Amino acid sequence: MRIWPEPDLPVLPGRGPGLRLYDSADRQIRPTSPGATATMYVCGITPYDATHLGHAATYLAFDLVNRVWRDNGHRVHYVQNVTDVDDPLFERAERDGVDWRALGDEQTELFRTDMTALRVIPPRDYVAATEAIGEVVEMVEKLLAAGSAYVVDDAEYPDVYYRADATVQFGYESNYDHETMLTLFAERGGDPQRPGKAEPLDALLWRAQRPGEPSWPSPFGPGRPGWHVECSAISLSRIGFGFDVQGGGSDLIFPHHEFSAAHAESATGERRFARHYVHAGMIGWDGHKMSKSRGNLVLVSRLRADGVDPMAIRLGLMAGHYRADRSWSDGLLAESSARLHRWRSATALPAGPDATDLIGRLRRYLADDLDTPKALAAVDGWVTDALDFGGRDTAAPGLVATALDALLGVR
Ligand code: 5CA
Ligand code: ZN
């Protein structure tokens, strides 16, 4: 699919320390170890009710990963999907009396506009589920041939399921016990009660065509992809097995990322799908996780229409640590707008205090599991000095502006 325009990415002189990130599987902060080209797959939107501030926060976190790697001289092969075939999308299209394809296209376009405004670096490959049916079918065939998948005994709807126990390592990504898995599976799109399954946890790979639902031909009958296999197939076909970072919000830790990894591990016979599994915390509003199902959404496009500077949204979402569940509020937005104003005033001065220490600290804090609260506080320190006491370094304001742009995406 079409990507959105690339923001200018200035080059900052020098290098920072290597990026360390918290890995949900190993439950610790570990160094990333990319080659010349770092590789990252981040789960994209299901295109309705886009783009709320929870989505934005998650994509901003991985934008920082992208920026820190690039600042360290890596190229980045970044892949993102769009789940444009899924039950909730069909339900919304039906409720609103629109075609699901039109709804998906329109919402994906809105997402592109929002990402552009937020200065998020686009993925290299932006792939819709509907563009990846061939890869999914191939993968389901492999899983069936390996005995990791089976067709349920149902003449009317012969769905294909993945055996949750097909790999010995299943469960390593989330570290959840069986009971927690069952609870989350039921809450997050799974179907533990489906008759004919071998085990309640087994995950849908291919849903046989139901009346009125879109379908594609396959050797195991017309139907459509399950959810987890979409991300397995797209990441394997675009990047390949064993990439640097698999990312998304913490609501994807289980079942989505556990099964995406398991499908790929079963299909290849290899052991670890991604080197790091990285998860952003949930953004809340009005006391609850911001979610389409609850409807407590603050949309990026709404804020933009109200005249909010997208850079203030960026700063507001980066004011907290990416892994922390945190709340959006009008107060946070007001603080971020004021902060943005001060930063812009200071970087527009003809001279300021030396910026070497600030840039070193910015790089160190970001490399340490994207510690944006510390990074923002360090910038505030330099800005206060510059505005209150001035300085003699005529290059410093420009250098700070470049650092904010390159590392934090704020200008
Ligand atoms: N299409 C799937 C992933 S393959 C999906 O989860 N789509 S989504 O539209 O529901 O979410 C898109 C991304 O935003 C996911 O990474 C999800 O984890 C993240 N996300 C959703 N709600 C929030 C929230 N309230 N706070 C932070 N991130 C969120
Ligand atoms: Zn996904």
Image (tube, grey):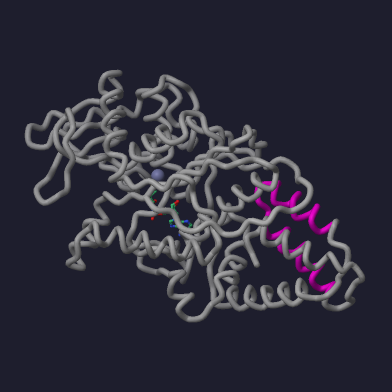
Give the magenta part as a residue range: 357-386
Residue found farthest to the right: 392
**Residue at left offset 23%, top offset 27%:** 198
Position of residue 36 relative to residue 212, above or below, is above
Q: Is residue 84 above or below residue 261?
A: below
Q: Which percent across, then down, holds residue 368?
A: 70, 47
Q: Main secondary structure of the magenta part?
A: helix
Left or right relative to 140: residue 396? right
Q: Is residue 343 above or below residue 105?
A: below
Q: Residue at x 28, y 40 (%)?
A: 226
Image side of residue 332 versus residue 129, left or right? right
Relative depth, front residue between 211 and 402? 402
Q: Position of residue 343 (x, y in %)?
A: 72, 72
Give the image quarter of residue 23.
Answer: top right
Residue 376 drawn in magenta: yes
Residue at image location 59% in from the left, 36% down from the top: 37
Location of ligand 1 given as a quarter of the image = bottom left
| Residue at (52% x, 59% y) in the render | 57
Whole-percent x, y for residue 79 in the image: 46, 43
The answer to which quarter of the image holds residue 332 is bottom right
**Where does the image place residue 371, in percent across and percent down from the top left?**
68, 53
Quadrant housing residue 19: top right
Q: Any magenta on residue 372?
A: yes
Query: Which of the two residues, 137 or 257, is positioned nearer the viewer here?
Result: 137
Q: Nearer the viewer, residue 162 or 305?
A: 305
142 up-or-down from 200: above or below: above
Q: Looking at the figure, which quarter contains the C terminus?
A: bottom right
